[in-house]
């Protein structure tokens, strides 16, 4: 009982911390976006909003469950929370991938073919964000049909539990179709993310060599803000990949374990929310102009 109380309090603290951090980033980038209208700022606004949804739909229910108040969440609430959480997780990888690509294009030389793809206005990004929303909503559309109230199920019918929501067995063909779609989505977006990141590393290396040459020549040179932003995006991408793959390996371990230990399951739940909690503080730390928006 004490362990569950401690777990619930930790979820309250970390979820609250993540929500506050993301709200801070959301408000600050909205402030910057009004004056600059940059595509990257719009994407970061969308990412912060997505993180807030992830924390509200993933962190708060687990807090309620850990504190022994799971009866407050009925079957309709379960359907909404699980569905929105799955869509938000899909939007997280989609938005992070888009951010990496746009930043790679932004720092590309104007004369290159990638430089010509740079969005002339943030409005060109809106259709992509809308497409990502529809795509992830469709990929997760099977979930609400298989979330049931525990009181209406036999023990043999429960195939998985999130402490507050329970999943009934579904048609294995439909299940594998949606699993394949999710894996394909993640593979495509991570492949694009990897290509864009590699390209940015190449451009940053060239920029570093240029700076060293100027320093050797005793010439002053100021690093463009685009290069600093690219470093921030790379750090954000590494943060995402760390939590994504840690979550995957831990989920596989817990799934195939004969016994579900409290510490292992709890660690998996915290890692599941790690990116949404940590990413705003990565941006706050890296982008000093965020603290100057109101000055």
Image: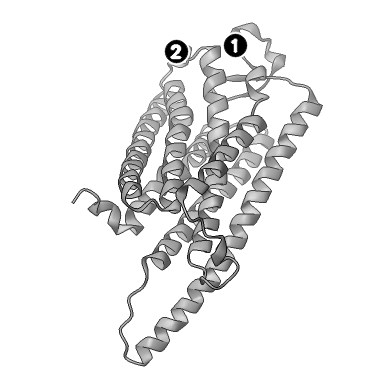
Q: Is residue 233 above or below residue 150?
A: below
Residue at image mark 1: 149
Residue at 64 percent across and 24 percent down: it is 143
> Does 220 sit left or right of 150 as displayed?
left
Percent of width and height locating residue 273? 48, 39
Q: Is residue 172 visible?
A: yes
Disc 2: CA contacts within 10 A as few (<14), some (14-19) or many (>=20) = few
Tag 1, which secondary structure?
loop
Residue at 50 percent across and 53 percent down: it is 99
Percent of width and height locating residue 43? 46, 47
> Does 37 sit left or right of 169 as displayed?
left
The residues tagged by marks 1 and 2 sit, at their Cα atoms, a distance apart of 12 Å
> In the current view of this chain or complex, which residue is farthest to the front?
120
* Image mark for residue 31: none
Percent of width and height locating residue 20? 32, 38
Q: Which is more toward the observer, 142 or 70?
A: 142
> In the current view of this chain or complex, which residue is farthest to the top?
152
Q: Is residue 138 above or below residue 30?
A: above
Residue at 58 percent across and 61 percent down: it is 196
Residue at image mark 2: 72
* Quarter assignment of residue 1: top left
Q: Is residue 268 above or below residue 227?
A: above
Q: Which is more toward the observer, 153 or 258?
A: 153
């Amino acid at each position: 009982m004490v362990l569950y109380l401690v777990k619930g309090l930790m979820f309250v603290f970390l979820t609250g911390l993540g929500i506050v951090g993301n709200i801070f980033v959301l408000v600050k980038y909205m402030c910057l976006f009004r004056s600059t209208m940059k595509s990257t700022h719009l994407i970061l606004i969308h990412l912060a909003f997505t993180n807030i949804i992830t924390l509200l739909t993933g962190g708060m229910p687990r807090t309620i469950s850990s504190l022994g108040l799971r009866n407050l969440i009925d079957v309709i609430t379960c359907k909404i929370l699980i569905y929105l959480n799955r869509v938000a997780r899909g939007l997280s990888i989609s938005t992070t991938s888009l951010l990496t690509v746009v930043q790679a294009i932004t720092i590309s030389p104007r004369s290159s073919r990638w430089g010509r793809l740079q969005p002339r206005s943030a409005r060109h990004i809106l259709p992509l964000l809308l497409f990502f929303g529809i795509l992830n909503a469709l990929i997760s559309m099977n979930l609400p049909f298989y979330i049931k109230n525990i009181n209406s199920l036999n023990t043999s019918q429960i195939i998985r539990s999130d402490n507050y929501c329970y999943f009934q067995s579904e048609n294995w063909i439909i299940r594998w179709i949606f699993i394949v779609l999710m894996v394909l989505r993640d593979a495509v977006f991570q492949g694009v993310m990897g290509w864009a990141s590699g390209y940015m590393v190449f451009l940053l290396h060239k920029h570093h060599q240029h700076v060293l040459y100027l320093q050797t020549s005793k010439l002053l040179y100021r690093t463009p803000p685009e290069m600093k932003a690219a470093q921030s995006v790379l750090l954000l991408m590494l943060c995402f990949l760390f939590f994504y793959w840690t979550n995957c390996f831990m989920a596989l371990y817990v799934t195939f374990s004969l016994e579900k230990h409290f510490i292992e399951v709890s660690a998996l739940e915290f890692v599941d929310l790690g990116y949404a909690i940590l990413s705003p503080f990565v941006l706050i730390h890296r982008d000093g102009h965020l603290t100057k928006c109101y000055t």
